[in-house]
Image (tube, rainbow, N blue to C red):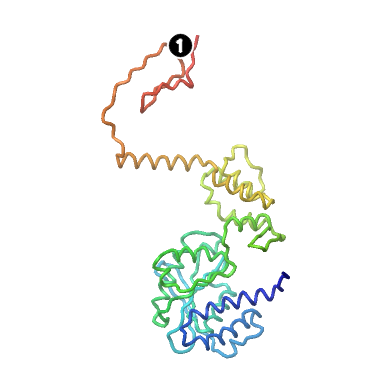
Amino acid sequence: MASRHPLTRVVAAWGICVGLLVLAVPLGLRVTAGATACRFLAEFLTEGSRPWLSASTHAPPRESVTLVSGGTAHLWRPRGRPPHPGLVLVHGLTPEGKNDPRLAWAAGLLARAGFVVMVPDLPAMRTQRLRPDDAVAVAAAVRRLAADPAVHGYGLVMLAISVGAAPALGAAADSEIDARVRLFVSLGGYGDARELVRYFTTGAYTFREVSGRVHFDPALARAYLALNLDLVHDPSDREAVRAALAGLPLPATAGPEARAVLAVLSNRDPARVDTLLEQARRSLNQAEREKLYGEVQDILARELVWIPVYNTKEIVATRAHVKGFVVHPVEYNLGLGKTWLDK
């Protein structure tokens, strides 16, 4: 089958998205909403060169709100009598956050289409980081918008852009948030973190029958890693990776965690990505292992899950020329693996 023109695919994809948005509107208003959606689509796809929606609507007012999570958000309100459908717009990796001009233009256009639009600011996303705290901000925005008296009670739309799908889906995992969201739409969202790593380190991509390879800039992945070094748990390995990113040679003392991370970063073979990621996942982090074992021992001591009924006295005697023998601290165990005779 012949491949469709890219513009045709874009129009088809956005047509589906707008159709889904129309479904968020009550049944009696769908005819009018359909015409508005067409004007929105024409203006959005032409990046404003055909302002069919703006020419027929008034500019929506924007206000700043403070969320219960302590974060902030921008709120666009459509002209006209309420109630209106509500939409939470979740941005991706952008240093300007909710103030990104492209995001503000899209939010204003959606408000012209009749939505009350809330755009929460995601601090981690603004600094090129993926962190669970951003899901808290998205959840707070959903709660705030759902409680707005100008928003109808048919459920909200959540529209996530690019990697903004991660905190949006993280928020929707909460049953309370899930009950408030009627429709979830992701534009360019990633469905597999492995494929995201493969794309930004090798330029290769695959989705169903579509695959290919593009030119990529390795500096992007290096810059992203530099901003997320706190995810390298071992402090010495963290500094080793930092030094390598600065162009210094990797020290011989670098541990398995540093080597695994840098192996993924420097790889250019798409077929090796899965193997390298699995090796990175299994890399030994001695400091983290000791911490976990210490926590387990604390729990065992606190919960007293094992109390011996009695203790026996074990007496072990050795001659002076027996070296390296150590008595086991807990049980009777003649471990002779390091024992030797000095004659």
> Residue 189 appears at what percent x and percent y?
57, 66
**Residue occupying the far bottom of the picture:** 56
Q: Secondary structure at mark 1?
A: loop
Image quadrant assignment for residue 56: bottom right
Q: Is residue 291 above or below residue 271?
A: above
Q: Is residue 71 left or right of residue 96?
A: left
Image quadrant assignment for residue 198: bottom right
Which amino acid type corresponds to the residue marked 1 in the rendered image? His
Q: How many numbered discs sit on the rendered protein? A: 1
Instruction: Read off the residue under disc 1.
Output: 321
Q: Is residue 322 above or below residue 106?
A: above
> Residue 127 appears at what percent x and percent y?
55, 61
> Residue 213 appears at what percent x and percent y?
71, 59
Q: Mark 1: give few (<14), some (14-19) or many (20+) Cα within 10 Å.
A: few
The residue nearer to you, when weighing 68 against 47, is: 47
Q: Is residue 273 above or below residue 118?
A: above
The residue nearer to you, when weighing 342 against 17, is: 17
> Residue 20 appears at what percent x and percent y?
53, 77
